[in-house]
Amino acid sequence: MKVFLAISCAVLTFVGCSPLIPVYAPRRDNNEYHRLATTPQDCLGCHDVSGIRKHDEDKNCLRCHRLNEVYP
Ligand code: HEC
Ligand code: HEC
């Protein structure tokens, strides 16, 4: 029973957490050009991601970098 519980917890934790958005990804300032940019191509027009670790150009930037809704 204990082993079963341990495995269940491990599986649930993995399944439950995998789709999480990285919480420490900086949010985008809620300004005109950030509201208009909707595709990774838009972002790349202004941002060079080659120097940032783990940033591929084909990734969906918006999945992690949400608009900052707290400080408009
Ligand atoms: C018109 C140019 C432009 C476009 C398009 C643009 N940005 Fe920005 N972005 C900036 C500028 C300039 C800053 C820094 C000043 C500011 O925050 O307003 C910035 C700041 C940021 C920051 C904060 C960086 C930090 O160190 O806190 C993130 C994250 C970001 N942008 C992501 C994105 C993403 C993702 C997209 C595409 C949806 C995007 N930007 C589109 C110009 C742009
Ligand atoms: C998987 C999540 C994820 C994706 C997708 C992603 N980022 Fe990031 N980004 C982060 C995190 C986390 C940071 C925090 C800084 C770091 O990791 O070095 C960051 C940092 C940044 C910064 C700030 C770098 C600095 O020097 O302060 C900019 C600008 C940025 N990302 C732009 C983009 C753009 C443009 C795209 C799309 C091509 C993108 N990101 C895709 C997670 C992501």
Image (cartoon, grey):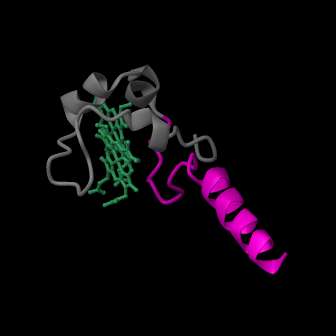
Residue sitting nearer the eye, 41 or 1: 1
**What percent of the width, then of the height, locates residue 21?**
54, 48
Q: Is residue 2 visible?
A: yes
Image coords of residue 27 (percent x, y): 47, 47
Where in the figure is residue 22, as x and y percent of width and height?
50, 54
Asked if residue 15 lies in the magenta stretch, the reply is yes
User: In the rendered picture of this protein, how many numbered marks are placed on residues?
Assistant: 0
Q: Is residue 12 left or right of residue 20?
A: right
Q: Nearer the viewer, residue 47 or 13?
A: 13
User: Above or below — where is 37 with respect to 71?
Assistant: above
Q: Residue furthest right?
A: 1
17 falls in the magenta region: yes
Question: Which image quadrant: the N terminus?
Answer: bottom right
User: Along the horizontal axis of the image, is 61 left or right of 48?
Assistant: right
Identify the residue at horizontal 44%, vertical 53% (top origin): 26
Between 29 and 53, the one lying in front of the other is 53
- Quarter-wise, where is residue 37 in the image? top left
Residue located 74% across and 63% down the image: 8
1 relative to 45 in the view: left or right:
right
Is 41 located above or below residue 64 in the figure?
above
Q: Residue furthest bottom?
A: 2
Assign the C terminus to one quadrant of the image: top right
- Horizontal and vertical percent position of residue 18: 56, 51
Indicate left or right for 52 with 40 as reference.
Answer: left
Classify 46 as above or below 15.
above
Q: Is residue 65 visible?
A: no
- What residue range appears in magenta? 1-30
